[in-house]
Image: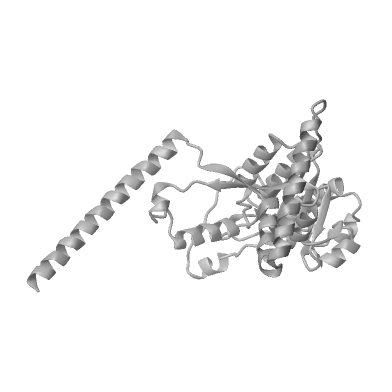
Amino acid sequence: MEFLIDYGLFFAKSVTVLVVIALVLALIASNKQKISGQNKGYIEVKNLNETFADYTDAIKSVVLDEAQLKKEHKDKQKQEKQARKAQKKSTEQVPERRKRVYVIDFDGDIKASANSSLREEITAVLGLAESQDEVVIKLESGGGMVHSYGLAASQLTRITEKSIPLTVCVDKVAASGGYMMACVADKIVAAPFAILGSIGVVAQLPNFHRLLKKNDIDYEMYTAGEFKRTVTMFGENTEKGRTKFLEDLEKTHVLFKDYVQEHRSVVDVDKVATGEVWYGRRALDERLIDELKTSDGYLLDQAQKADIFRVEFTQKKSLPEKLGFAAESTLDRLLVRWLSRVQSKRWF
């Protein structure tokens, strides 16, 4: 028994030493990556036509009998052989290639954090896509910070500026800043109960001035410029400051409406820019979208005449992340997120 206790203590000490060494090595490696400025991600491309075909083959293998499967296999081989012969005969001219559809997912949070991946994915696609191709953005976002979603919409504009058709598919929600992104597209496709619209601006923040005053706590703030700060969380807000703050919100709303009008002229902006939202069917009546269909249905239809590729920028994990040593605790992340919300002025 004494031997087992000694061995257990030795084993625990050894594990502790190894963990400490691994942590130190991980931190060193992480710092080296930051200093060297290495690219922390890479592009992954998946052929969705092959995925759809695999699904179909899986069903056929169970539903069809052996004779039918053999016949289908022979017919497929025959078609492939004929295609190869036709390609060999057309030596005088280059055969016209099939249309390519590039699919990019954008799952937007309040800060539009997916912007960093979106820019890389669009850059990769623009390196090869041509005017006969198409880019499909599977968009889901309830909106967020004005400047963040303004940048995301500008990233999509890069596609249309190259005269490449852009389609946005909305299965659940593209509201506020999400709709600002969607309106850039040549075509918006949405599921029947997807939420769209919310063309408006909102700002909210708590004010602790009375609480501080009650506890004899002074709060002082110094600014250069009359409207450097209009309303604050801790100071006593004035009517002049509130009025200026509301004017800033209204200016932002006007910019939002003008942007929608510029990119989607078929919409009666004055009618829809009330901050309201519409489900897919009603959004079609208001011409906020062009077609009712899920993204899956749209891509499956395209698969009959085009090669479809899903493009994704994947972030590389640092050694500390692989070992499970996160740089921030969950509490830290929640605190930073809360502070960013209460300190920000305008939201889509």
The answer to whether residue 205 of the structure is visible from this angle is yes
**Residue at far top of view:** 92
Quarter containing the N terminus: bottom left
185 left or right, relative to 236:
right
Image point (63%, 57%), residue name: 110
Q: Position of residue 87 (x, y in %)?
A: 77, 35
Q: Position of residue 123 (x, y in %)?
A: 66, 38
**Residue at far front of view:** 67
Q: Position of residue 11 (x, y in %)?
A: 18, 61
Which picture quadrant has residue 276? bottom right
> Is 148 placed above or below 69 here?
above
Which picture quadrant has residue 326? bottom left
The answer to whether residue 244 of the structure is visible from this angle is no
Residue closest to the eye, 343 or 187 = 187
Image point (65%, 56%), residue name: 108
335 left or right, relative to 50:
left
